[in-house]
Image (cartoon, rainbow, N blue to C red):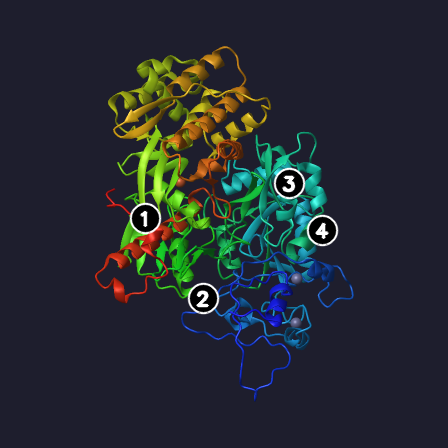
Amino acid sequence: MVQSKPSNHLRHSHPPLAEIHRLDVQYTTDLSTSYSGFYIRESMSQGDVVTWIPPDLAVCEECKKELHDPAARRFRYPFTNCTHCGPRYTIVHRLPYDRVNTSMHAFPLCEACRAEYENPLDRRFHAEPIACPTCGPHLVLWDAAGTPLTEREEALTQAADAIKSGAIVAVKGLGGFHLIVNASDPAAVQRLRQRKHREAKPFALMYPGMAEIEADCEICPTEREILQSYVAPIVLVRRKSAGGRIAENVAPGMTTLGVMLPYTPLHVLLMEEIGAPVVATSGNISEEPICTDEHEALQRLRNIADFFLVHNRPIVRPVDDSVVRIVNGDVMVLRRARGYAPQPISLNATSTSSVLGVGGHLKNTVAVNKDSYVFLSQHIGDMENARAYSLFIETVQKTEELFACRPSRVVADKHPDYPTAVYAQSLGLTTEFVQHHAAHALACMAEHGISGPVFAVVWDGTGYGEDGTVWGGEFLHVSPCEARRLGHLRTFRLPGGEAAVREPRRSLLGLLYEIYGEHAVEIAAVQRVFTARERNVLCRLLTRQTNAPTTSSVGRLFDAVACLVGIASVNHFEGQAAMLLEQAAQTYNATVLPYPIRWGKDADMFVWDWEPMVKALLQEQVSGASASLIAARFHATLVQVIQEAVQHAPTLPVVLSGGCFQNARLLEESVRRLREHGVTVHYPKGVPPNDGGIALGQVYYGIARAATEVSSSPHAATQDVTQRPTEDFPYVSSHSR
Ligand code: ZN
Ligand code: ZN
Ligand code: FE
């Protein structure tokens, strides 16, 4: 490739959001052709050429200016957009990304819009979804029964008035519906909780502007930047302790709030009319997928919403708001959807095979690769739910279709009962299974271009282990197609199995039973959270070892400790107890010492035995230590455990992954300590550390497996494996798992 002036110009003067993935320069010797001007040619659909579609982009400053300019053609037009902003992934049916292939096909451009579209000097030159009040979509306001009340400007102002006066309004936005209520009105928020069957899980908030967010929350520059970026995700931020107008039941007991800024012109206008923060939560019932179609929404949300603010631009696929948190000074994506999906994750080597990863069970996503790019789908949801499961199948099909991927191999979780794994086996492709925690580590390795091996600390709530027990506190040796368990947390039993996920008190009893046997029921912390009858029933399960599976889960350990210090005996939503424990630790500012640490052995594995910690912790509690001190020491202990564990593989880089590392205190302290000791450490940033990243890890594994098969086949010499030499995987073992 030769550098030339024009290519440098392209490199440096492209539009703000353009990304150059490859730049080829060819000199022509054909002097009969003379080139003048700059053109964007029609896209050529060429078989296997990798083309992609940008994520949806939050409304840009110039479009906002036009919204407020009475002289502009698009003054107060809720669907204005341009080359720098607007819907993309949520409106595209197929590639290439041309208007005919989007849901804007139904709106032929008017003359004025066409002129902008064709003018290279215009901001809307070749912006596929552009529209105006003459030719584009418009708003309608429905009552709860779907009867149209009014439309356009009036629909907007009436919806705003309804929200201000306490109504629940379902608003069709970019990737689906929101349910919106006034966040300062506890009665309205309570009504939403009841109707949506959402007891305590915090609601996300949309604020009219940055200044209003800063009035209620502590915002650092990185948080401000991501809030105002084209991604405009929900950002988990610290709530100011005093004042604020957010009703307590928006995020009961939480010191953080999930906040976002208006990211479409519709939301900008609506929020200006309302002039105060609102709850803007996904338009669904409990954990179902978000509604996208207004007629479907009318059915599904009829018992929730008082009004429906809808429009006639079809949403091609549901895309929720993304959720991020600033951890260690960087953005960590916790839910990857709007603004991120379907941006591919670029691997550090190409692959000749295409692999589908079907994900795990909760917070599911799917992934499929083309060459070195992995397309990780937007957040789909929990597979316990029939609607989420059909959306899962639809997303697999649509993602493969959109990016013209034809996977020859599928990788699923080892859990035999996961519907995603059952689905994978029905596809008739080469099917492989990768252990849950290995997939967590592999996702992080894929994201950071690590071709292994690493020492992985994978801590989460639940994952199916190689030995059929519930894992979740694992130390693994992982390379792209091989994982070995080196160590784990000492196991304990969960009385009643699955029920322990919802009831931290069961984890507490199981943990203490492991130390004290039946005497565990005499401990004050246990007596506090169970009736005598409950204690006896559960104790019997533990004694008989029936319906009391063993686990090495750090998530459950968090639950047990949270319950022990009196913070949470029941989880109203996933991870609640652990979040409250982290919060409690954050209020303790002085340096603390870890509790005593003991290491044991299990066959050839090392085991962290938490018994001395639990005993010390109990003693400290009896002597009146605060929950926040105990929480802080518990976190310090986990950090110390990680630091000591990595000494089992002193030369390997360390990967920290799994849902527990959404805990900023745990992650930041661990990273700091490891780096102080000269250890190279990686952790997830752009891909969630939780189960939303599993599919990426699965694809990475599948690609590596395919590469080893190719390289070991007798025909290897005739196949192109140059892109993925086996030296990339020096630790390929016998795969005995
Ligand atoms: Zn714009
Ligand atoms: Zn127009
Ligand atoms: Fe997990």
* Spatial CA span between label 4 and label 2: 41 Å
Give the residue pinned by disc 2.
50
Give the residue pinned by disc 1.
730
Amino acid type, residue under disc 2 in the picture: Val
State the mark number for residue 272. Answer: 4
Marked residue nearer the N-terminal end (1 or 4): 4
Residue at image position (68%, 44%) is 165
Q: Can residue 156 be seen in this view?
A: yes
Amino acid type, residue under disc 3 in the picture: Ala
* Spatial CA span between label 1 and label 4: 59 Å
Pick out the residue farthest to the right: 71
Q: Quadrant of the C terminus?
A: top left
Q: Position of residue 142 (x, y in %)?
A: 60, 56
Amino acid type, residue under disc 4 in the picture: Glu
* Spatial CA span between label 3 and label 2: 44 Å
Mark 3 CB lies closer than 8 A to ligand 1: no
* Spatial CA span between label 1 and label 3: 56 Å
Q: Position of residue 717 (x, y in %)?
A: 26, 64
